[in-house]
Image (cartoon, rainbow, N blue to C red):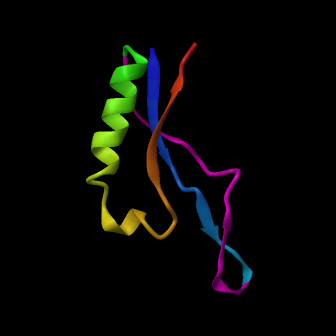
Amino acid sequence: MYKIFTRNWWKKGEGGGLVPDPTARKTHVTYVSTQGEARDWCERNNAKRPKSWEKLSRKYEYTSDY
């Protein structure tokens, strides 16, 4: 089982610049059965993600849920 989620890779730092966000909250989206399904799902949906997600590099990702 593979868990698909979103998170921001960046956050606003002091002075208005962007810094890595290692503590970003992961927001669960769905589960799929295989790694191939997870990869395809993320690639397909990252290609059409909202423009508002681009600044902080918010993306769909997946992890094994074992």
Residue 9 lies in the magenta-colored region: no
Quadrant of the image containing the C terminus: top right
Residue placed farthest to the bottom in the image? 15
Instruction: Tell me: residue 63, above or below residue 58.
Output: above
Instruction: Tell me: residue 66, above or below residue 46.
Output: above
Q: Residue at x 37, y 38 (%)?
A: 42
Instruction: Tell me: residue 64, above or below residue 22.
Output: above
Q: Which residues are magenta?
A: 15-32
* Residue 50, percent from left and from top: 30, 61
Q: Residue at x 54, y 56 (%)?
A: 8
* Residue 23, percent from left and from top: 69, 50
- The number of callouts visible is 0
Q: Residue at x 29, y 51 (%)?
A: 47
53 sits to left or right of 9: left
* Residue 56, percent from left and from top: 52, 65
Location of residue 35 by image quarter: top left
9 sits to left or right of 1: right
Q: Residue at x 60, y 63 (%)?
A: 10
Instruction: Tell me: residue 60, above or below residue 41.
Output: below
Residue 22 lies in the magenta-colored region: yes
Quadrant of the image containing the N terminus: top left
